[in-house]
Each structure stands twice: as structure tokens, then as C-alpha cells.
Amino acid sequence: MKAYRFPEGFNWGTATASYQIEGGKGGRAPCIWDAFCKTEGRVVNGDNGDLACDHFTLYKEDVKIMKDMGLKNYRLSIAMPRIFPGGQGPANEEGIAFYNGLIDCLLDAGITPCVTLYHWDLPLELEMEHGGWQNYITVERFLEYAEVCFERFGDRVKSWLTFNEPWCAAVLGYGNGEMAPGCTSSDAVKVYRAGHHMLLGHARAVEIYRKKFRTAQNGVIGVTLNCNWTEPKPSDDPETAKLNAEAAERSVLWNLGWFADPVYKGDYPEVMRNRCGDRLPEFTADEKALLKGSSDFFGLNHYSTDYAEDDSGPGHYVSHWGTVNTGGFWGDMAVRGSTDPSWAKTDMGWPIVPWGFRKLLLWIQARYSPEGGIQVTENGAAVNEPTVDLAVDDKARIVYYEGYLKEMHAAIQLGADVRAYYAWSFMDNFEWAYGYSKRFGLVHVDYNTMKRTPKSSLKWFSKVLSTNTLERRLWLDV
Ligand code: PNW
């Protein structure tokens, strides 16, 4: 039996997000997801986050499960509409008290919190009044909110993430409308503008943290970006193979470099600037300087891999939701995505391709050599679990994790400076446009009774983190 040992001091954790687990109790104002959920046809079964996992009420029970599994790190997000219900100060003290309780409870349990400031739950007021991320006013409000969080929680929180996956918030929120606020943009102008504003929000929040809080609080701050690996679609024709290889590289630059290049190099990738023309906003010299070096580590969320083919006509990219996009963001990228029939898929329909994770980690290491290393802030699988009994016996999830951890280990051996890994997710939760129909948790949640039941994967993960080692089980060696 082969074992894969991870570097000394490697940080293991699990992750969640406010809207997906907390529910609306305790003075949280509506956010863009509440409105989106209440719009017919947007979310599977008309589900919403009104109660979610009622983590607001049950957080002590949840932290107890974390403690019992020996968890050392937990990534959570703060709901901006709980702190700034109307989109601006003064802070809602009931909301502050909730996070104080949660943070203290985690620390008492020996668990280090990593806190995301923005995981997509924008106060609805900011969208209605100002057009959300289309408007720089939202950046200003976000910065005021970020400062309140540093001030009130930074004595205990030493690891911050400004934004979760600005790609999703911009492309799916303002491009094809698959996520809140459900806007569309056929020329992608709104997509690039939303991304631009989030980048500025990130850089300025980091500036505030470094200038006003870092000396006293001594924490780290970064942003976390999502990206699938794209592998050139194999072709016997050398010319097509070459075009596909370029398309695959362009896709990673487009989806990840769009945010990572400004953060590590001070500007958008050249390929984007060339292809988008003046539809892509420009940074001023000051903004470039502010952006460059604005992450203390490289935050990465990774789930899957696609084939890439050159697609110089209007974009035909089929998203994970099955939406065909014609033009706009995907048209600019000119990459057609597809999967290999031999790749198994998770319950999201996302291909399970562990080696894509290794290739992406090595790509990031090569392009950015991030000083504070790479922190994988999400990775995991949805499994079809119609009953709690089936959920508890979640071998398929363990197989997914085993494959991805093995490749992460290989990437580390090959020089990728990966220092942390958070499993998505600690517990089943509201999976955005899929509502409660998709389960990603290490803990099963019965949404009628709110009963929590740890799955086999929780036990398995608990062993990985306590031994800092991945062991191959015999039944996986097939
Ligand atoms: C992430 N894609 O979302 C989010 O950060 C989580 O809140 C979410 O629950 C989790 O992954 C699982 O979906 C993504 O289309 C949504 O590539 C879509 C994509 C990637 C990540």
C-alpha cells in the first residue's frame, strides 16, 4: 500500500459560505440571491436561502462536529447583508455578535478561521439602487464593510480572502444570468466591468488592511480564484492540434489570468487586451501599482477539467449548466469546451480529471511563483445522495478526493508550492442555481429536521488531516 505524505505544516480544512448555510435569521437583509431565488425559473425547485442549514442557530453543533473530526482550519464567509443590511453602515450589531460568537467558538475548538469577505451575497439595496458591481459605489461600500470586518474581527481572524471567485460573480452574474443578479451582456461589457470593479475592490481592501491593520493584527490577505484546467482536445491533424493547444492556454489565461495577472503582474493578460479592445476597462498607473502584489498567497478553487478547441466563430461554449453562449465573453475567448467520453462525472456533470488539478497547480507555479504559496480554498464533489443511508456511504466522494489529493501531492513533488487545502464543503448546503438538489458535504443535512449526519468521507478526511498523509485503500486500487 502506497502512502502520500504531505509537507510538514501543511494546512487542512473545510469550507462553506454564508448564504449557502446560514439562513436569514438575526437581522440579515435580503441580498441579490434572495431576489434571484424568488424569480420564477431561476433556481431548481424554487429553493432559497431563507433557512438554508440554519447554521445561524446551529453553529455550535456544527463546530462541535468539526472539533470531533480534528479539524484545524475552517473557511467561512461573512454575509455583507448581515453587517450592512442596507448596503452601508453603521454596522448591525446583531450581525457582528453572530460572527463574534462563531469565531470565538471556532478558536475555543482549536480551529483557525479563514474568512471570505464576499461570497456573492451582495445586499440587494446596492443592486437595486446602484446596479451592484456595475457601479464603483459598490466598491466603496464594500471597502467600508471590509474595514468594519478588519476592525471588529481582525484581533482573532488572521487569514482573509477579499472575494470568492470573481469569475463566477462577473460571468454568471452579469454575462449569461445563470447566477444572481441574473443580468446578461451580449457584448460582455458588463462582465468585464464587474470583474474590474471586484479587482479594484480587492486591491483597495488589501491596501486598507496593510496600512491600517496588518502591523497590529499580523494576518494575511488574498483573493481566491476559480479555474478549470483546459487540456487541448487531441487531434490527428497537426494544424488543429496546434490551434487547440493555443486555445487551451488562452482559456486558462482568460478564466484565471483575467484576475491573477492583475494581482501578480499589474495588468490584464495581453491576449485579453488585444481581443477585447475598449470593451475591457483599463487600469490607471496607480491602480496597476496597487494591484501588483496585492495577494499574500494564491487562493485557488478547482473542480474539473475540459477539453479546449479553437473556436474562432461566435462562441459555442456549453457551460456546466448546458447553456449555449453565442458571442460575448465566450466569443471573445474563442474556445469551445467539451469533455472526453471516458471521463467520469460528478453529480454536477463536472468531469472528474485529477491530473488536470496537477497541471493547473504547476501552471500557476510557473506563471506566478506566488510568494506565499498556493492555498487550495475549495475542491470537492457533488454526489447523488437521495437518502441519508446512501449519503453516509459516500465512496464516490472519497474516490474523487483520493484522486485529487494524489495529484496535488504529485504537483508538490514537482515543485508547486501548495500549502493549504480546504474540502468543499463541510456540509451539504444551498448549491446556488441548483438549490438543495446537489450535495457536496462531508456532513449530510436533512433539510426537514436540520439533523446533521457525518458521511464516510468525513471520517476518511479526518484521518488524512490527522496523519497529514493520504493512504490508498485496497478497494480504491482497481
Ligand atoms: C464554487 N463553474 O462555485 C463556489 O465557490 C461555491 O460556493 C460552490 O458551492 C462550489 O464552487 C460548487 O459549485 C462554482 O462553472 C460555480 O466552473 C461554478 C463553477 C465553478 C465554481
Image (tube, rainbow, N blue to C red):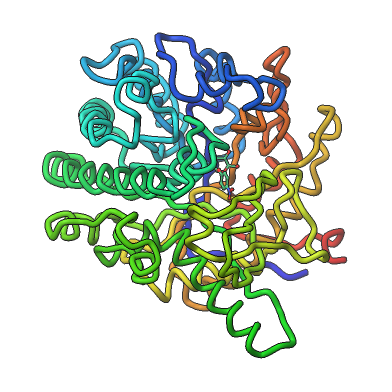
The answer to whether residue 461 of the structure is visible from this angle is: yes
| Residue 34 shown left or right of residue 325 in the figure | left
Horizontal side of 68 relative to 375 (left or right) equals: right
> Which sits in the foreground, 374 or 238?
238
Left or right of residue 43: residue 193:
left
Corner quadrant of residue 132: top left
Q: Nearer the viewer, residue 161 or 270?
A: 270
Whether residue 409 appears in this view of the structure is no
The image quarter containing residue 216 is top left
Q: Residue at x 49, y 39 (%)?
A: 184
Query: In which quadrant of this rendering is ligand 1 seen?
Result: top right
User: Vertical placement of 72 versus 229: above or below?
Assistant: above
Q: Position of residue 357 (x, y in %)?
A: 59, 64
- Label total for image: 0
Residue 250: where, in percent of width, then height?
A: 49, 70
- What residue sits 12% from the left and 45% below the top? 211
Give the camera-side residue of 260 and 110.
Answer: 260
Give the position of the C terminus as an image quadrant: bottom right
Where 160 falls versus 77 (above or below)? below
Spot occupied by residue 436 in the image (x, y as percentages of width and height) = 68, 27
Front residue of 269/448: it is: 269
Q: Quadrant of the N terminus?
A: bottom right
